[in-house]
Amino acid sequence: MFALCSYADEQGKGDNSKFGTYQTLKSFEEMSILGKGITEANTLEQFQNVKLNWENACKKTVALLYKCNDLIQFNKGKDILNLFNKYPVNQK
């Protein structure tokens, strides 16, 4: 994900944030985890072994940002989702 986000930033197709698209995506990941959007893991070991579905995490966070009326972050999330659509991430 870091490479894809870095490439998007280099090409001017990222979210145009000060710290880069990857950092925005990581903050979305944290919001999803805090909102229990990723996993219901009960232990630290379970949590560490769960694979993250970046696209689903981003979708859930973008929906939450829309509900909160945070349109700036919402638009950044939409840019990242467009990036996923343009360059699909193979999740095995």
Image: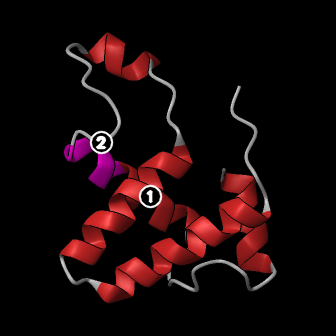
Q: Is residue 7 magenta?
A: no
Magenta span: predominant SS is helix
Span of residues in magenta: 30-35
Q: Residues within 10 Å of mark 2 (few under 14, many from 20)?
A: some
78, 45: nearer the viewer: 78
| Colour pattern | secondary structure
Residue 5 placement (x, y as % from top left): 68, 63
Residue 23 placement (x, y as % from top left): 49, 64
Horizontal side, residue 21 vs residue 38: left or right:
right
User: Is 70 located above or below residue 33 in the figure?
Assistant: below
Which residue appears at 38% of the width and 67% of the height? Answer: 62
Q: Amino acid at mark 1?
A: Lys
The residue to which callout 1 is attached is 59
- Which quadrant of the figure has residue 27? bottom left
- Which quadrant of the figure has residue 60? bottom left
Q: Amino acid at mark 2?
A: Gly
Horizontal side, residue 21 vs residue 75: left or right:
right
The residue to which callout 2 is attached is 37
Q: Is residue 5 visible?
A: no
SS type, badge 2:
loop
Total numbered labels placed on residues in the image: 2
Residue 53 placement (x, y as % from top left): 53, 39
Q: Quadrant of the C terminus?
A: top right
Horizontal side, residue 15 vs residue 36: left or right:
right
Which residue appears at 32% of the width and 29% of the height? Answer: 39
Task: Compare marks 2 and 1 and give the one earlier in the sequence.
Answer: 2
